[in-house]
Amino acid sequence: MTYLVSQSGTVSLQATLSASSAGLSDMLHHPITCQSKLWLHENGSLECEHHKAEPDDPRTRACIDHTIALLLLEEAHRRFEDGSIALVR
């Protein structure tokens, strides 16, 4: 999995999700591709300062699914590093 890193050296989740969602829709602008603040609403819609995408938008769905996958991977890595879980061979 490729992560995009911000200028500060930290992983930029928004940039990573934006890159991974490219080509999923013909929309010219989607909140995940915007550099402004990003909001996820309880109904599953994503919103930036310029546009709101509904939860059934393919890029919105892909971004939410991808976010959950990234969070699970990060948590598994954290638990592996602190010894909470181990690899079974």
Image (tube, grey):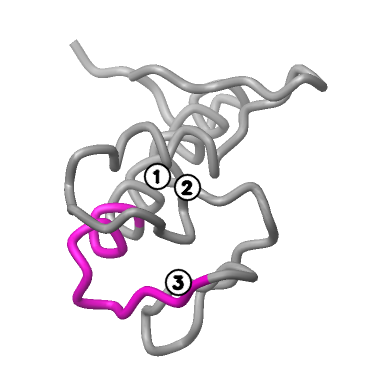
Type of amino acid under label 3: Leu
Residue occupying image coordinates x 47% and y 47%: 33
Image quarter in which the C terminus is found? top left
Residue occupying image coordinates x 39% and y 17%: 2
Residue occupying image coordinates x 69% and y 61%: 37
Whether 43 is drawn above or below 10: the answer is below
Q: Is residue 55 magenta?
A: yes
The residue at which mark 3 appears reads as 46
Tell me the magenta residue range.
Answer: 51-63
The first of marks 2 and 3 along the sequence is: 2
The residue at which mark 1 appears reads as 72
Q: Is residue 61 magenta?
A: yes
Judged from the image, the secondary structure of the residue bearing numbered disc 2 is helix
Q: Residues within 10 Å of mark 2 (few under 14, many from 20)?
A: some
Q: CA distance from mark 2 to mark 3?
A: 11 Å
What x and y, as percent, mark residue 53? Answer: 37, 74
**Quadrant hosting residue 12:** top right
Type of amino acid under label 1: Leu
Q: CA distance from mark 2 to mark 1?
A: 23 Å
Between 21 and 28, the one nearer to me in the picture = 28
Question: Is 58 displayed left or right of 4 in the figure?
Answer: left
